[in-house]
Amino acid sequence: MTGPRPTPAPRAHPPETTEGWYAFHQILSFDRTALRALWRDERTRLRVDAETALDAAATPARGGWSAVVPLIGSKADVMLVHFRPTLDGIADVQRSLARLELFDLLRPVYSFLSVTEAGLYHASAQLAQEAAARGGAVGDDAHRAAMDARVETERANPHVQRRLFPPLPGDLPYVCFYPMSKRRDVGQNWYALPLEERSRLMMAHGMTGRGYAGRAIGFDAWEWGVTLFAADPLVFKRIVTDMRFDEVSAQYAEFGEFFVGKVSGAREWLGETVG
């Protein structure tokens, strides 16, 4: 005689998402021996060409922006941050900079390609519950119609707009970038949690980081790239500490290397670095 069958765990549905701009972080280091070997006139020519290209990249005609972020306390020298409406736009700026002679003297230390994303955890959990209550299922016609309508509403929200199409904040010059992933360990697998539980956790997590960070889903071994902006670099210490103490990060987050710097004009950075 057998006992009752165990109740299966709720299926871990992914949340609905909506996407915005593509992002590319280039982290580079100078070959200083090769740079010092150049004649002054040659360094000047390379500097002027690079300044022209970086200024053009900062305000592209088709939307987005690029920023020069000299790094502080890093093994690399500079982080170039690019946001573009399309992946082809990222390819264009990557190629245009790679053609510069100055970039023959820069060595890639790290790069991260991603696309901005808003994960609609609360809406996804709510509509999944409503589908089950009416005897339907996630993905059926009624659920899909309701979700499409919710996505349009959420996408029009000003806060979501800032996450999907982040402006370069002129009053927050300090920048911190790091990649991160969610754990998949036994007993700590984020993707095995029911959608309702992930929704609960992300609500509190999102409130901690709101106003400081933009998060983009990575085309990388790391799942996300986080870009923080601040007027005071101590804000990075405070927000990262707060994030690590909340339940999502304490139990499920893995962090990569951190890169910290301050936004600079191309002329200022090149004048100080190349001469």
Image: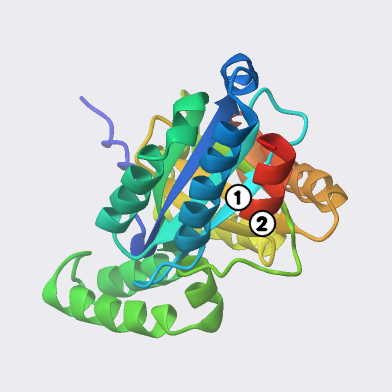
Of 42 and 145, the residue lying toward us? 42
Whether 186 is drawn above or below 142: the answer is above
Residue 122 placement (x, y as % from top left): 47, 68
Residue drawn at (68%, 67%) of the image:
211
Q: Is residue 262 left or right of residue 38?
A: right
Of 163 and 232, the residue lying toward us? 232
Quadrant into which the N terminus falls: top left
Query: Disc number at residue 31?
Result: none
Does the CB distance between marks 2 and 1 fall below 8 Å?
Answer: yes
Badge 1 is on which residue?
68
Badge 2 is on which residue?
265
User: Which residue extends farthest top?
Assistant: 33
Q: Is residue 84 left or right of residue 254?
A: left
Q: Which quadrant holds residue 210?
A: bottom right
Query: At label 2, which amino acid type do we have?
Result: Gly
Q: Is residue 63 visible?
A: yes
User: Label 2, label 1: how many angstroms apart (C-alpha)?
Assistant: 7 Å
Q: Is residue 247 visible?
A: no
Residue 169 placement (x, y as % from top left): 66, 68
Q: Residues within 10 Å of mark 2 (few under 14, many from 20)?
A: some
